[in-house]
Amino acid sequence: MRFLCLFFLVFAEQSFSMTFSDAVKKIKNHKKVQVLQLESERLKALASLKGAWDDPVLKLALKNLPQESLAKDESAMSGTEIAIEQKIPLSPYKSRSKEAYRFMASGKSWSAKGKQDQMIGHLWMMLIKIRGMKEELVILKDNLTWVKKMLNVAQRLYTKGRKSQQGVLDLKIRRTELVNQIDNKTLDLEEAYHHIHYSVGSSNAILIEDKTIPWVIFTRNGAQLDKRYKELQAMAKGQKLQASAKSWSRAPDIKLSLAYTKKEFEGLDDQVSMGVSVPLPLFSKSRDDYRAARLQAQKAQLDLEDYEIDKAARNHELELAISKINSELKSIENESIRYAENSRQITAKSYEIGDASYAELLQAELRLQKLKLRRIMLRTKFLNQSLKKKLLNGEPLYES
């Protein structure tokens, strides 16, 4: 125990506390979230690029100069040409591609928000675990106090010759077991605190101030905004538009050109020429490109539909699990623990007057401890299942 006290003094020096709201703010700026936000911005930039026309091409040429002199005025064929060319799409594939990337950027933005919820959910999981361990420590310490009291009674009865030494030894063994359980649980609690630091992007252990933790959110339902559904929906729309863009891209672009030729040869007028060119898609790979995009769009739509089905099934499973937990928890709180407390109290009084054995005394104590720990486990399980349900449905995980 002295070691643990010293250990936690060192731990306190190497950690710092913050409010739950501050932890949420840090999570929103976590590197994992920033990576997805940057990817969204990258896709937005690509959207503008995909929707833009190709730049016009400006050409300057000296044409048909004599080999010997390279003079511009010795031949009627010679001249200085300035030309401009512009590729013009005949189909809406560029605008479709632009919209596709905008939807995919939106999908990544929703993914970033979903990542925030996942990391806040992880923070909640650790806080739920810590809360359960703290409650377990209270029970173990209360039991230790009770066992020490019963040990004093056993030693007094043994001194008077009314009880055997075996009862004293068994209570001492039980006392040692409880001390070890408290020490181990305390170390587990310290480890749980260290698991919080990565979620909030800190290199030190984090202590979330208890009074700032909004446990009230588990007592009510919040507005639902399913980020995962929004992400899949945006990606499905984006892939569908991308397939449409690939389909339209099979229509070739035309290239318009306008040229002006300055003639230096005496007696000849300057010339203007215009032209239209269209590529012949004899060896184009656009058909396979479109097929790949169409299959990707089908996959994205199936992912969305599968998620909706899976979400409904998981919601049903969670509701049944929560209902089952509440039923058992109600039974333990209203009946079992009350009966076990009365049983231990009666057995302790009987032991003090010599009517109960040390085995009955320990059995009553262990039965009550088991029920109290079972209650904590059920409460923790209820909070975890409720957290999963909130994450699944996109309910708020903090108070804004």
Image (cartoon, rainbow, N blue to C red):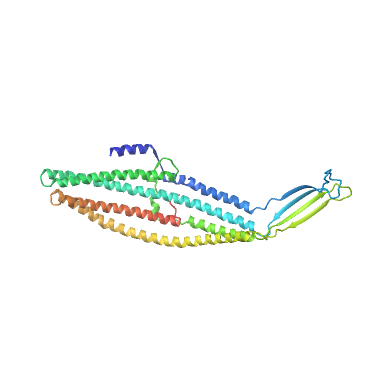
Does the image show residue 272? yes
State which quadrant residue 190 falls in: top left
Q: Nearer the viewer, residue 327 or 2?
A: 2
Please state which of residues 294 and 236 is positioned toward the viewer in this rendering. Answer: 294
Q: Is residue 307 left or right of residue 237?
A: left
Q: Between residues 85 and 79, which one lies in front from this camera angle?
A: 79
Residue 353 location, x and y as percent?
13, 49
Q: Residue at x 78, y 55 (%)?
A: 274
Q: Residue furthest front?
A: 68
Q: Residue at x 47, y 50 (%)?
A: 116
Quadrant for the N terminus, please: top left
Relative image position of residue 245 (x, y in whole percent): 62, 59
Q: How many marks?
A: 0
x, y percentage for residue 331? 28, 58
Image x and y of residue 363, in percent: 20, 52
The residue shown at (28%, 52%) is 372
